[in-house]
Image (cartoon, grey):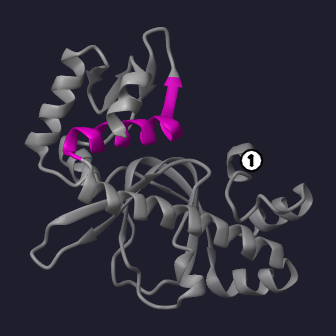
Amino acid sequence: MDQHVVMKAPLFSALDEVTAERLVSSMTPQRLARGEVVFREGDPGDSLYVIVSGKVKLARASGDGRESLLSVLGPGEMFGELSLFDPGPRLSTAYVVSGSELISLGNESLRTFLQTHPEVAMQMLAGMAHRLRRTNEGISDLVFTDVPGRVAKALLDLSDRFGRRTEAGLLVAHELTQEELAQLVGASRETVNKALADFAHRGWISLGAKAVTLLDLQRLRRRAR
């Protein structure tokens, strides 16, 4: 387990190394393959999860069965913690996007821990507030930003968390299908593919299989505004 990655999670960032390691040792590790479900919308919210490696997507289903992709999370990020502060059924389904290693902690164990480490609760709330801010920005983008602008913003957001510098540019191995990427942007697959093809034609990106290389960050940032 990569301790450096784990310690980036809000659950551990306010702790000293010894206390953090003790907490990690009390958590339950699990390995899941792509497509496996961590929990489903409507399930009891009884644990939080920290991603050690891999990627997890959070999605919600509409009444007619269609899915909306809320976010894609990677190493050092946390999910499922909302149930600690607002007990009730899960509001989304968590799917594994790529083979992942997770560690989990039950709500009762976490509540006991927070009684002696209240500073951790503040860090967790800050992490939740950051995610809420991103959600609000996404809602605003759906109203005020066109699809190419949303695609550019999504690529930049994915690059911030999953990008890796190469000789060609900033490689983003997002591991999402075309349909999943369209769900993340909130548009049809055809419209998103058209925007990606246009960006590639302009020389801003290079497309690959479940990956994209960003070649001109400046123009993408300008298009995302």
| Location of residue 86 with respect to 20 vertically, above or below | below
Judged left or right of residue 112, residue 90 is: left
Q: Nearer the viewer, residue 12 or 191?
A: 191
Q: Nearer the viewer, residue 213 or 36?
A: 213
Prevailing SS of the magenta stretch: helix
Percent position (x, y) of residue 166?
50, 14
Mark 1 crowdedness (10 Å alpha carbons): few <14, some 14-19, many ≥20 = few
- Per the rendered image, the range of residues in magenta is 146-164
Q: Quadrant of residue 175?
A: top left
Q: Whole-percent x and y of residue 115?
A: 82, 86
Q: Residue at x 85, y 62 (%)?
A: 15
Locate residue 155 relative to residue 123 in the image: left or right. Answer: left
Q: Quadrant of residue 203?
A: top left
User: Residue 172 location, x and y as percent?
Assistant: 42, 30
Q: Is residue 72 left or right of residue 194?
A: right
Q: In this figure, which residue is indicated by the disc labeled 1?
A: 3
Q: How many marks?
A: 1
In the depicted structure, whether residue 163 falls above or below residue 154: above
Magenta span includes 178:
no
For residue 149: magenta? yes
- Left or right: residue 198 versus residue 86 is left
Quarter of the image that includes the C terminus: top left
x and y percent of residue 186 in the render? Answer: 22, 55
The residue at the point 32 percent across, 33 percent down is 223
Q: Is residue 179 above or below residue 210?
A: below
Pick the front one: 155 or 5: 155
Q: Choose between 154 and 88: the one closer to the eye.
A: 154
Under mark 1, the amino acid is Gln
* Element under disc 1: helix
> Residue visible at 29% across and 33% down?
210
> What residue is shown at x 74% (from left), y 52% (from top)?
7
